[in-house]
Image: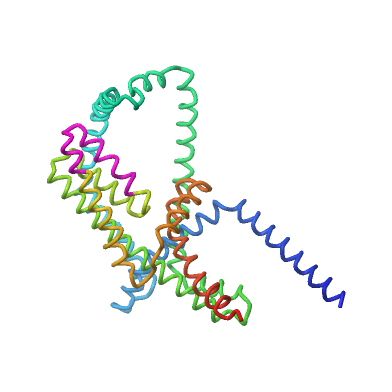
Amino acid sequence: MRQPSQGLSSRSLLGALALIVLGLLAWELRWVLLVLFGAVVLAVALDVPTTLLMRRTRLGRGPSLVIVLLALVGIALALAQVLLPELVEQVQQLGLLAPAVARRLGEISRQVSWLPDLNTSLANLGSWDRLQPIGSQLLGLAGGAANSTVQLLLMALLAVLFSLDPGSHRKLIIALTPSFWRRRMGFLLDECREALGGWLAGMTLSAITVFLLTWAGLALLRVPLALLSALVCGLLTFVPTIGPTAATLLPLSVALLVSPATVLQVLVLRLVLQNGEAFLLTPLLLRRTVNLLPTVALMAQLSLGALLGLPGLLLALPLVVVLQVICEQVVVRDVMDRWR
């Protein structure tokens, strides 16, 4: 009786050590894994229209992917031709309006007793002792931006390679699993791909809707920088809970230059659109794919944002989508439902 017990304890110890080593290795390679997962997300985004085109035209995967990429480039160029001149003009206006916004905020801070004086705070920031750390931070930001650009290019290249031959990569993952679980792994990969593709399609439609409605609303209210503010609101829709709230700061700041009534109108507009997108539009678009709890989404964003910064914040929800499918199929059905 002692030998099996000792053998079992040795196996448990080796298994625990293996898990610890794998965890440390994953942490050391976290940026590589983050780029790899981001490439998978982009590959799924490319695979959805590619597969649809293959079914409609019976073309091969290579030509279908080339057509999809050319269509995306064409759409981007058309949008740039239409929107880029106005967007560049509004970015220049933002640089001109920034001092006026700062002065307006300074006036508000002087009128409210419990707020710190903004002008005094800016004057203190202008001292050499305080500018030196800011300069170091700016250099760090420049280096981080260059590193992020390289990671994005590598991510895009990997996504195209994954999209060219997803079947071979799928077979490789299945081959690395035990033989008795390979059929289950194939089903799990299909479920993750469907959930992730549905989430991407739903969030893209939601972001486009928020962008158009915000642009139209701000234009009707005659708020400056309407296009730039709407673009920021649309892009930050991909970061639910945190993103829309942060995106509202730009149109509110610009509305300060118009009137207090305009600030209130912009706030009401953003609250209506934000709640309509969160509680009506997004659940309607994602009802057949995945339903994320707001608390789970927020905790994932905060955790990955703290650990990995902005890339972790952006990829938190796709990761939660995949983990939710794995938990439902493996933890719940294969473990908990069979537990007697």
Q: Which residues are magenta?
A: 244-266
Residue at 25% across / 58% down in the picture?
276
Observer-nearest residue: 52 or 93? 93
To which quarter of the image does residue 60 belong?
Answer: bottom left
Vertical side of 312 occupied by 12: above or below: below
Q: Is residue 251 left or right of residue 153?
A: left
Q: Is residue 90 left or right of residue 24?
A: left
Observer-nearest residue: 72 or 235? 235
Residue that lies at the very extreme toward the front in this rendered image: 113
Q: Quadrant of the N terminus?
A: bottom right
Q: Is residue 72 left or right of residue 324?
A: left
Q: Position of residue 189 (x, y in %)?
A: 49, 73
Q: Position of residue 158 (x, y in %)?
A: 47, 59
Residue at 53% across / 48% down in the picture?
307
Observer-nearest residue: 140 or 154? 140
Q: Is residue 257 magenta?
A: yes
Q: Position of residue 163 (x, y in %)?
A: 43, 67
Q: Is residue 96 magenta?
A: no
Vertical side of 182 occupied by 158: above or below: above
Q: Quadrant of the C terminus?
A: bottom right
Q: Position of residue 330 (x, y in %)?
A: 54, 74
Main SS of the magenta segment? helix
